[in-house]
Amino acid sequence: MLAMAQALHLSQKMTLSQVLAPQLQQSLALLQAPTLELKAMVEQELQQNPVLEEAAPTEMTLEEKEGREDEEAAAVADPTEPPADVTFDPATEKNSNAPVDDFQAEFERLTQLDQEWRDHFAQTNIPMRQSQEEEEKRQFMFDSLVAGTSLQENLLEQIRQIGEMIVGNIDDYGYLQSSVDELAFATNIRPESILEVLKVIQSFHPTGVGARDLRECLLLQLEREGRQDTLEYRIVSEFMEALGKRRIPEIARGLGATVDDVQKALARIGNLEPRPGRAFLPDNNQYILPEVFVQRVGEDFVVTTNNEQVPHLRISNTYKDIMAQVDSSAEVREYIREKIRAGKFLIKSLHQRQQTILNIAREIVKRQREFMDKGVAFLKPLTMVQVAEIVGVHETTVSRAVSGKYMETPQGIFEMKYFFTSGIQTASGVGISNTSVKEMLSDMIKAEQPSKPLSDEEIVKLLDQKGIKIARRTVAKYRSELNILPSHLRKVY
């Protein structure tokens, strides 16, 4: 048998790949970040780049003037395109009135202080270092100490052990995720003891915390309010499954009550909190800061960006002066030159971000003028490709620019992505957005008779009368997206 020879071979291969430069990545990140996140990013840059400083909002820095001139001279460049190299000439931008610091003396003084601190730190820490053997002897001495415990301390320790175990198994919504038997098996503690401590925890605030399921959670809240003899307590206690499926006639027959009384009891049950821990969730309240403001002025709509919340940066004159000093070393000059170049690119990127968002917002307002005048029912179909063609950027740039951004309009505050929606052709040939169709569908269902809810087929006919031709399965899809039940589950007997 012939053995196959193995050998190493060298070969060359050409591949084409696209790699984003660090500055381009930073520019895209600035464009995509909402205002609050943008402020945090700029704060980080201020800490990392010593040549940057924040100017008062009323000041117009030289860098801002350059940015404004660039914006007025040409349309905003697409951030997905590599930016032009930013150069900085200290000779032309030096402020002659600014004081000139003795950089070399300052640098030597800082170096001396740093060395003195290192010497002091080393001297004060050497005596405190102990050998491995000394540390083991010391630990053995502490481990050998025996302290007596009283009966009260022993009982408290048992309660603490069970209580910490139960609380540790309660999720963020307030529900106990492990059964009493599972906890007893894991800790070798009697189930009766665990159940007694659980009852104590269930008496804590918020009401319903420590429940093992939704039924127990609602019962705990009703018991806390002394409503054990009410109809809603019997419904939760005896007909929880039927309650979840909204089988009102079945509940009424089982309890010997009228349908009207059951519906009133269900309304009171709806006021209970199904998730007791909701108020303690970290993201329970979200603060929205609009990026764009739309205001009516006469017959027109004026669009402005929220520039007050965007930090105003400039290059510190101190470092410009250091660059102009003859006795500055080559390394210092190169370091400062690189930081100034990075700072100027950041400033230009911030201006470019604001202008890109402004241009996109203006085009949205232009195309959605009827929405600004009359409301959601007049929202028109709009795609990011259409806006990108007018603004002169790529579709992905529009997507990044509107991501997580909000616009304050005469109709309220909306996410900028809200205005981009597919459409449906009406009988007259005019396009209408699916968001507007959903709004019509929702209004129809709100106005329906509870005893005779509209079926999906009936909604199709009503929309057809308005000139909107739409399939029944599309109506069912929109109804599902609006969290509206089918007609047979909405019917009230």
Image (cartoon, helix red, strand yellow):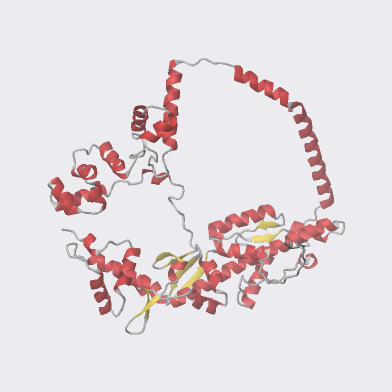
Q: Is residue 192 above or below residue 419?
A: above
Is residue 60 in view from this perspective? no
Residue lying at the far bottom in this picture: please name it: 428
Compared with residue 124, is residue 273 higher up or lower down, i.e. above or below?
below
Taking the spot 38% from the left edge, 39% from the top edge, the residue there is 176
The quadrant holding residue 69 is: bottom right
Q: Nearer the viewer, residue 329 or 101?
A: 329
Residue drawn 22% across the image and 46% down it: 239
Vertical placement of residue 363 versus 272, above or below: below
Residue 404 in sight here: yes
Q: Which quadrant would residue 183 be assigned to in this image? A: top left
At 64% across and 72% down in the image, what residue appears?
Answer: 81
Tell which of 326 and 155 is nearer to you: 155
Residue lying at the far right of the rendered structure: 327
Left or right, residue 351 beside residue 447: right
In this figure, what is the number of numbered marks? 0
Q: Is residue 393 left or right of residue 225?
A: right
Residue 194, percent across and down?
Answer: 37, 30
**Image spot of residue 43 (x, y percent):** 62, 54
- Across and down, in percent, residue 70 comes to 65, 74
> In which quarter of the view is residue 158 placed?
top left
Quadrant for the N terminus in the image: bottom right
Is 192 positioned to the left or the right of 397 in the image? left
Pinpoint residue 404: horizontal percent, then vertical percent.
Answer: 50, 62
Residue at (15, 50) in percent of width and height: 252
Q: Work out which quarter of the rendered image holds the C terminus and state it.
A: bottom left
